[in-house]
Amino acid sequence: MRATWKGQLLAESDDTVVVEGNHYFPEATLKREHFRASDHHSVCPWKGTASYYDVVVGDEVNANAAWFYPTPSEAAASIRGRVAFWKGVDVV
């Protein structure tokens, strides 16, 4: 699987975990130059509290376009250390 935005590779892996239709990539596969920490958080009733990254390509910023669960619930343990995407990021 490959995650891209604005023609730039954000992550690539043949080891993604699919939860609720989203591919969670191992954090180690992220191209870190395209990520910046966000102060945004959201809560999922069964996964826990999500943290976000802004995706940055050149001068373009896709705010909160990547998310992860730093301490997922036991039910969501399979996504610990993994990142998923939305907001126009292509995952194919």
Image (spheres, rainbow, N blue to C red):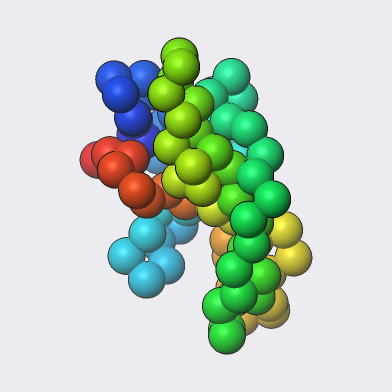
Tell me if residue 32 comes above or below residue 50 in the rendering. above
Tell me if residue 68 comes above or below residue 53 in the rendering. below
Q: Position of residue 52 (x, y in %)?
A: 60, 50
Q: Position of residue 41 (x, y in %)?
A: 64, 62
Q: How many marks?
A: 0
Q: Residue reaching furthest right?
A: 71
Q: Is residue 16 visible?
A: no
Quarter location, residue 13 = top left
Q: Residue reaching furthest top?
A: 58
Residue at 63%, 32% (x, y): give it: 36
Residue at 59%, 68% (x, y): give it: 42
Q: Residue reaching furthest bottom?
A: 45
Q: Position of residue 23 (x, y in %)?
A: 39, 53
Q: Nearer the viewer, residue 23 or 36?
A: 36
For the N terminus, the image quarter is: top left
Tell me if residue 37 comes above or below residue 74 in the rendering. above
Q: Is residue 3 visible?
A: yes
Quarter location, residue 43 = bottom right
Q: Is residue 65 left or right of residue 48?
A: left
Residue at 57%, 85% (x, y): give it: 45
Residue at 32%, 65% (x, y): give it: 21
For the C terminus, the image quarter is: top left
Q: Position of residue 46 (x, y in %)?
A: 57, 84
Quarter location, residue 12 = top left
